[in-house]
Amino acid sequence: MCLTGTVAADGFDGHRFTSPNALESATSQLFGDDSNVSKSYAHAYTISSEWLRKKEERACPLDGNCPRGYGAPQGPLGEVYVTHSTIPVERSDGTKVNATWRYVVGVQVSVALNVTADDIMDTMGNGTNTEYYQFAWDDAKTFRPSTLDSFSEASPVQVTVNAGSECTTGVGRIVATTECFPFNMHVVAPVLSAPTKWVLIGEVGKFIPISNQRIESISISSSDGLTVSIVGAADEIVTMGAMNVGIATGVVYQSTTISNGSGVIRWSK
């Protein structure tokens, strides 16, 4: 709130105060009766001070147990956003389901926050499987995670505080040391099949690695291999990652070149 604002002369505009008298009383307590600042400035400062007091009342304590699950008046202490992508999947038995990947972004959070299944989905089932995995983009392995972590009620997404430290970014010809990302980017991915438990990480180099604009369909073969049908521009090289969490210990990346507007990327069991 701008401290040079003013309270409207033709009507009360005291925001958190219930009446002009309440605002005058609070202003008097802050500035006294003999203050040489203008009334407009004193009113604006008092209103701003009250907003900050209300914010502090709702702030999360250091132990992380936030009252009503929230911190600042707008929600968490910082900004947290959630979105999703849904792609059709055909399993090896011929059944078809919709699989949904969920994305959690934390921007300049000042208190760490746990994001649970209740926060981002209606159920843990989602019509595909009750098992999910999570991964996060980081500075060192930009958009190319090597391992996955379980996602469950006991293992939520952890949106962390940006410490403002220096990080080495890039994996190609240009490697630079800059301030670490001012945001967290997390992906919660469903297990696509059983018993092989394929998890599709998606396209390398994209904030939204799973997109309907890139992926037409996903299928699991009778031999339990994973096939992803994609679209794109002619001669475009597309790289995607997937992991068979039932038998593998790391993410496997495969590439293909788009021809006649489409392409296929496959992973074998």
Image (cartoon, rainbow, N blue to C red):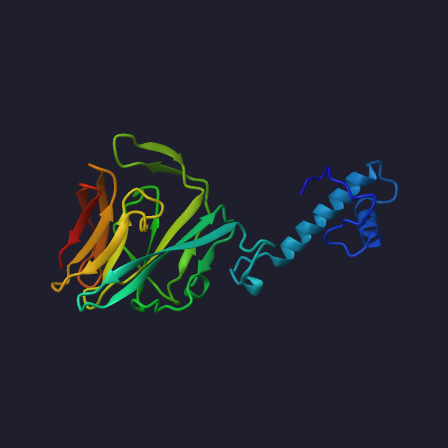
Q: As rendered, which of 128 and 199 lies closer to the eye? A: 128
> How many circles with numbers are drawn on the protein?
0
In the figure, 189 relative to 256: above or below?
Answer: below
- Residue 161, position in %: x, y? 46, 49
Could you say which quadrant of the image residue 138 lies in? top left
Residue at x 46%, y 62% (from the top left corner): 119
Check the image and name the residue furthest to the top: 174
Q: Position of residue 237 (x, y in %)?
A: 21, 39
Visible residue check, residue 251: no
- Whether residue 267 is visible, yes or no, is yes
Q: 223 and 241: which one is in front? A: 223
Q: Is residue 47 above or below residue 70?
A: above
Q: Is residue 123 left or right of residue 46?
A: left
The N terminus: image quadrant:
top right
Q: What's the residue at 82%, 37% (across, down)? A: 38
Is 265 left, or right, of 108 in this rendering? left
Residue 165, given in percent of the width and then of the height, sits at: 43, 40
Q: Position of residue 52 (x, y in %)?
A: 66, 50
Quarter of the image for residue 40 reads top right
Residue drawn at 18 percent across, 55 percent down: 227
Left or right of 2, for residue 156? left
- Quarter that holds the C terminus: bottom left
Q: Residue furthest left?
A: 223
Residue drawn at 30 percent across, 42 percent down: 205
Q: Quadrant of residue 174?
A: top left
The residue sitting at the right extreme is 34
